[in-house]
Amino acid sequence: MTAETEAATVTDANSKAVVTRARERHLKVLKRWLRVAITLAVVALGLILNPLYQRHFDRSILLEANSGAVEVTLSEEVGGKSFENAALCQRRDRPDFNATGGEYGCLGSMFEVVRPEGPFVLSFPAGTRLKFESRPGRLDIAIASLPESAKGTPLAKLESGRIILEGDGLSSFGHFLGRGTLRIGAPFGNVDEVPLIDANYQVNAKSVISILSLRGGPTVVQDGRIQSGAILTFTAANPPRDAESDADHLVPARVNIAIPDPEETGLMRVSALSDYTTVDLLVDHFLAEPILIRPSLIGAVANDPVLILMAFLVGGLIGFFQWVWPKEG
């Protein structure tokens, strides 16, 4: 082989090596841009789908709170609630303008305090608005308003009045179970009511796999803790178009009110499970913008047990293949 032939061969080999390296660089650049494009596509898809998930997919919110003030507007009748050793601040048949003062804060000229003998039972029709106020050794249940169906009934005498439970009456209260819209926490500026002390919430919704497969029930997709002083309500993510007041934006819940330690703390333990619909938890703090707690698509993906298992298996398989067939160079 002549020198010229050897030089040509070397030059040809160098050219092929240069072309190969250039091709590899181009492939690396293409792979890098492909990863960027896929990442951007996933982010864009998430930004598009997340609002749809938040506003159009049903969920329920479980709330456990300790508070001295709760307001409930009943969506269903609560029948047969028994009370013992209670004092009733009820409306007089006729105003007595000679009466002054009044027990338990009842206006003496318009209301009188009556103490029924023995246990008695009350039924509260749908539409009744009740305000529960507790403090150590005492529980007040104010009947803030009644529906038209209650007019002319014995319960009507308690409208704008209250039921007062102390001592044995408070110990025998048990719990109040009903369904309705609620507000947990004392109104801002009201120093006579004990505010929300703390609360825990849990959002239950269908996982991504359940949505795609049209099978399976809801799972926990989000949870957290709420600090003291807030006012909590369940609100609709998609309120009706003909909503005229704030009450039309509220979502009913199954609520259970009990007082575990009536003499020491006097706090009510409130357990509420909202209806399974497009519901949000509204957290309102004094002199701050309200916060909406709602599930996110990221939370649904991160808490999906099937996706977690699939990610674990795929990661394990990738690690296994990299160990069996290590990348050369």
Image (cartoon, rainbow, N blue to C red):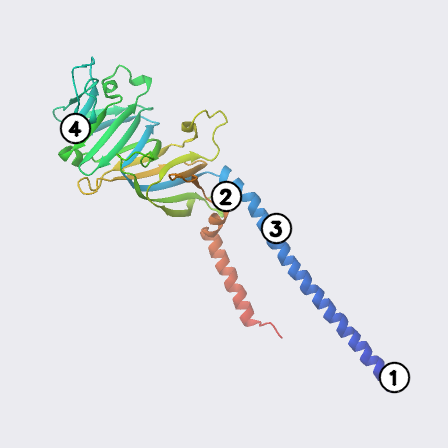
Type of amino acid at the residue the image marks with label 2 = Ile
Q: How far is mark 2 from mark 4, CA to CA?
A: 51 Å
Residue 103 image point, x, y percent: 16, 26
> How many C-alpha atoms fall within 10 Å of the one at disc 1: few (<14), some, or many (≥20)?
few
Quadrant in the picture for residue 258: top left
Q: Looking at the figure, which quarter contains the N terminus?
A: bottom right
**Which comes before the other along the chain, label 2 or label 1?**
1
Q: Specify whether 300 is left or right of 48.
A: left
Q: How far is mark 2 from mark 1, CA to CA?
A: 71 Å
Type of amino acid at the residue the image marks with label 4 = Ala
Instruction: Please name the residue that numbered disc 4 is placed on.
Output: 86
Residue 72 image point, x, y percent: 32, 30
Instruction: Please name the residue that numbered disc 3 is placed on.
Output: 41
In the rendered structure, are the residues bearing label 1 and label 4 in contact, judged by CB atoms less than 8 Å apart? no
Secondary structure beneath dot 1 equals helix
Instruction: Please name the residue that numbered disc 1 is placed on.
Output: 4
Secondary structure beneath dot 2 equals helix
Secondary structure beneath dot 3 equals helix
Number of numbered labels in the structure image? 4
- Of badges 1 and 4, nearer the viewer stands 4
Quadrant in the picture for residue 275: top left
- Vertical arrangement, residue 129 with respect to residue 223, above or below: above
Q: How far is mark 2 from mark 3, CA to CA?
A: 21 Å
Instruction: Please name the residue that numbered disc 2 is placed on.
Output: 211
Type of amino acid at the residue the image marks with label 1 = Glu
Q: How far is mark 3 from mark 1, CA to CA?
A: 54 Å
